Structure formats: structure tokens, C-alpha cells
Amino acid sequence: MVELDGALVTLRSSAHLKKVHGSSLVGSATSLDDNSDADDLSELEAVALSALNPGKRSEVERQAQVFDELVMAPSSMSANERYQAAADELGISLRTAYRRGQRYAEKGIAGLVDSRQLRPSRPTVDPLWDAICVEVLEEYRNQSNPTMKIVLKKTNALFATRFPSKVSPSRSVGYRRIRELDKGRYTFGAAKQRRSVAERPQGHMGRLRADRPGQYVVLDTTRLDVFAMEPLTGRWLNTELTVAMDLYSRCILGMVLRAVSTTSQDVATVLYQVVTPQHWGPPQDAELPSPYVGIPDNLMAMSTATVPDTIVVDHGKVYLSAHTKSVCHRLGINIQPATPHKPTDKPTLERFFRTLRQQLLEHLPAYKGPDVYSRGQRVEDGAFYYVSELETIIREWIGIYHHTPHRGLCDPRMDSVELSPAEMFSRGASAAGVLRLPASEDLRMEFLDVAWRTIQHYGVEIDGRRYDGPGLNYYRGAISPFGGAHAGRWPIMVDRDDVRTVFFQDPDSKIWHTLEWEHTEGLTAPFSAEAADYTRQLALKSDRHVAPDEALNDLLERHGKGKVTAQREKNLARRLAAQSTDAGAEKGTEVIDLFTHLARRQKQPPVGDDLDVFEKYSNEGDKFEVFDE
């Protein structure tokens, strides 16, 4: 600095001169005094004062008042006499009073703070011992829970081996230090929580923020902490809940509860619920509007304008399957996979699952707890719910959840007001634009698989199953106008979760027609493609040529008697048994025992021809009357 002219400063570097504004140098200015040898209290006096408890803070303020009145105030007494009076008032020696008075005059009230009161009271431990203890605790990240005794023993052994000249802390001090170093590691707590915390990113954690409803939709699957029951076999089973949540408003946009495990078709079902209006809550509240996330009107890019921008999923096979990817690609949905083993990438859904467990599942019968250590004794002997009933209860509870204040939802301009997911959705919808409902029925078909087949005189054949319907009358034996890899064939939309029906679109009228399987009348429950393939394999193994519905009944019967041994066969039977109740509840039908029905028909006397039938009814009395024309 060579010149100071008001607010302007002239700087020189070798032969170069530069004129800058003086205020721009304030941020980079440093003190010329070397305070490296000063005590800790000189660094930040506010910290020293706030570290005192109320009693010690009052004592420091009383000492400051005494020094102001007896030492600092003008007086005819000499300096020794003033300090002696302050010493008598405070009950200290003259030397101590003189030393405190000098610090008070130099540093203010912070100079009267005794630095010994701010030092830690716990015994000191060698930092090298702490480093070895942390190393031992890290070894148990993916192992079973140890005891504190074995951790202390291993730490002392390594410390004695590496540093023979140093002394290990005592047993009580070592235990106290292990507890301090283990804080946040959960070495002696739940192993699952320990692994989850270890995978947590270190340092500053960012946050995925959404600006409007429908921008980010988070999907995840969890196993519920409550048992359900099969309606046909009466066996207990686990269920998996798949949920889609809007990141902006925390509203639940779609959910599916499935027995045993979730498939890619279930994920497609949840995505279909996301892009179509759903009802949440009790049936009597059906008139109330439910959150429906779509693209705002001013950002509309497709004809339907109902799909989310991005879905956040994990690396599970059901989320990254070819079926899910194709659905998202056709609808223009971006897929953003979360980091593997990082639950912090989807914290909103993890917190929702915890809220679901604490507010609903804990109050239901057959609640088994989050782990085996929390499970009660013979919880399966109590009351129970079927899978369909459990899904209905969860849907009604979600309607309550949408109108409950959420601590994680707030407006920066009203930080003290907690908003509910429904209120947050309304605020986002009013700020982002008007939502538009689906404009085409084709949207539903985008979530189904495409099977390219020819149309024969009997209909179409898919995986050995024949489908037919009136919608094929004008195209039987016709060649498809579609080209490409399947030239000459017609696209048939197949729901792999229920193969009783498929869908065909008339190329002229663009109307979708439903084609029924020829054995649909014998099935009263959804029948998946997996079940159809497996029942065919069972029939081939036993050298029988039976209809698939009979093989299905045989599978459920053997599962009910405990004769099912293969793990895949067990899971399949459980899923089918749970789906039977779903269909019966929706259609109001009841499951018919096929074997009892066939046995009843065999006991009836055979009927010869139409004359025998007429003779049978004519012999019962005057039940016919002849009319003259």
C-alpha cells in the first residue's frame, strides 16, 4: 500500500500499480499482532462467558461490579488501598485481587473467568489409544455385536504391542472413553442401524429439492411389520408394500400391497396409479379431492400431461427391469437410481415407513415388531387381517396422513407453521399451474407388455393360451399393417399380473377391445402369467393333461395340506391365495370348490336326449298349459 486517498487505496506489486476501493480489502485484512501464545480465552470471549453456568456467571458479574466501584471509579485512596478494599469485599488475597483487576482492565468481564472452570473434568486419555480404539470399533461394522469388555481387551492389547512404553487407561476410564468414541457408531446397538450409519455419506450432505408437485416421485418397497393370512389355506405370510411419494408435497400417489414379494408388474401398477387420480381415506370421503400429481399446464409436453418428470428408485431388479424401463421410456419419465446402500438418498420414504409402523401397524393385530428381538410371543395366535383387508386399512390411513401436519414441510416465509401434505400440494399446484386429467385411454395400455401375434379364426394365442372376442371379427386372418421386426402381426397388450384378459385396439376406430381367455369362466381370481407357466410345468411332471384352472386348484390344495416343498412353489401359492380374496371382494363372488362340484354332478342320473328331459318334467304334474292360437 503506497497511498490512501479517502476511500481509494493504491497498491504496488513490483513495478505495477493498482488502485482499488478500500472496503474491498476489509475481508482479507489480518492483524499484525502475534497472539499465538495467548490463552484460549483471548480468542473468543463470548464462548468463555456462555460456557459458565448461571451461578458462576452471577459470581463473575459480581466481581466485575466490585472492581468498577472500588478500583476503576475515581477515588482519593491509593491503588493499594483500592485493591485491598476489593480483596476484602471478595474474600481473596491482595495479590489475587491485583491480578484479576489487571485482567479485567485489559479484557473486560471475560478476564475474570477462571480458565480452570472451562477445562474438561474427565481423565485424559492418550490420543494414540483413542485412535486404536476407533480402529477396533470399525472392525465390527459388518460383524455381530461385541461386548464392551472384548473391545477394551483388544484395544489394550494393540496399544501395548505398538507402544510398549505407554500406559493404558484404567478399566473404568477405558469403558467411559469407549462410550464416548462409539457415539454415532452403534457398535453395541442394532447391527442393521450400524451398517446403515456406516454407509451414510461423510461431510456436507446435499438435498434433492423439488420446485413443484410431480417433479420428483420416489419409489421404494418395504416388508411390513405385521402378519397377514391367506384366505384359502389359512397360513401366515409376510407382505411387501410398494409406495410412490411426491417429493415436493410428501403425498402418496400410489401403493400396492403384495404377498411374499413384489414384481415388476406391481411397480408398473404403482406408476399407473401415479398418473391417474386415486382415492385415499374412508369410503364416505369419496367426494373430497385427492392429491393428483401431473405436469402443470404451462409445462405440458405430451397429450396426456400426467406423467412425472423423474422417478427415484433403488437398484432392485423390479425397478430396473426391462418392463419398468420400457414404460418410463414410452412416457418420457426419467429414471434416477439412488446410491446403493444409501438410505439417505430416499429419506422421505424411510421416514414414511417409520410413521406407518408407529401410527398404524403397531395398533393392528398380528403386529410382529421391526425385528425378531421386538416380536411378542405367539403373535400369530391372535386376530388377523387378509391381504386385501390390510391394503384397504393402509389406504384409509394414508387419507389421514395427507391431512396431518408434517414437520418436514414448511414455507421459508412462514417457518413456524407446519403444513400437511395436502396443504403443501395445494400451495404447489397454485404456484406451478393448473393440472390436466388424462385425455386418452391409451395411457393405461402403456404400462402393459406388448405381444405380437397373428389373428386366426379362433382368435389369438399367447403362451399357449387362446383369447377371443367380438373385437376380432373384422380382422380374422388379416395381415397387420404394422411393419418392422414383427411385420404382419398385430400388437396385443398383456397384463402379466392377470392373464385372464388381453386388449386389442381396432386400427380404424382406435377403440380398445377386451379379449377373454377360453378358461376364464373357471377362474374367480386374478391369474398371473407366472402361475400359468408353473401350473403347466406341474402338469407335465405328473404326466397329466389337465386345464390350468384344475392345476391351480391342485396347487392350492397341496399347499393347504403342507405338501408343497419347493420355495418357488410356496411363494407362488401364497401370492395366488392372497389374490383370490382380492377378486372376491371386488366382484362379490365366492370361491367354489371345483372338486365338490364335479362330484355332485357325477351323482346325478345321466340324461339321454331331449325326449327324456320332456318326459321327466311332464310326469311331475300339471306344470304345462297349452294355449290355442
Image (tube, rainbow, N blue to C red):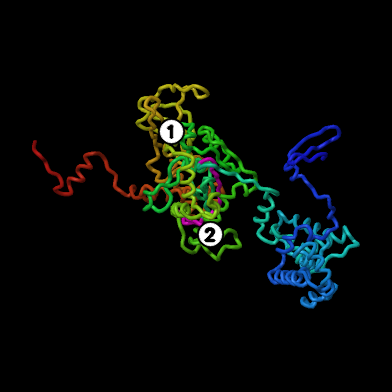
> Which residue is found at the position 47% from the left and 31% from the top?
302
Neighbor class of circle 2 (other Cα within 10 Å; few <14, some 14-19, many 20+) is: few
- Amino acid on which disc 1 is placed: Asp
Residue tagged by mark 1? 442
Which secondary structure lies at badge 2?
helix
Residue 550 in sight: yes
Measured from the top left, where is residue 503 in percent x and y? 42, 34
The quarter in which the C terminus is drawn is top left
Reading the chain from its start, which is encountered first: label 1 or label 2?
2
Residue tagged by mark 2? 358
> Observer-nearest residue: 42 or 265?
42
Left or right for 176, reference 288 = right
Magenta stretch in the rendered image: 214-236
The quarter in which the N terminus is drawn is top right
Marks 1 and 2 sit apart, C-alpha to C-alpha, by 40 Å
The circle drawn on residue 575 is none
Specify the quadrant of the image occupied by residue 58.
bottom right
Measured from the top left, where is residue 254 in percent x and y? 48, 45
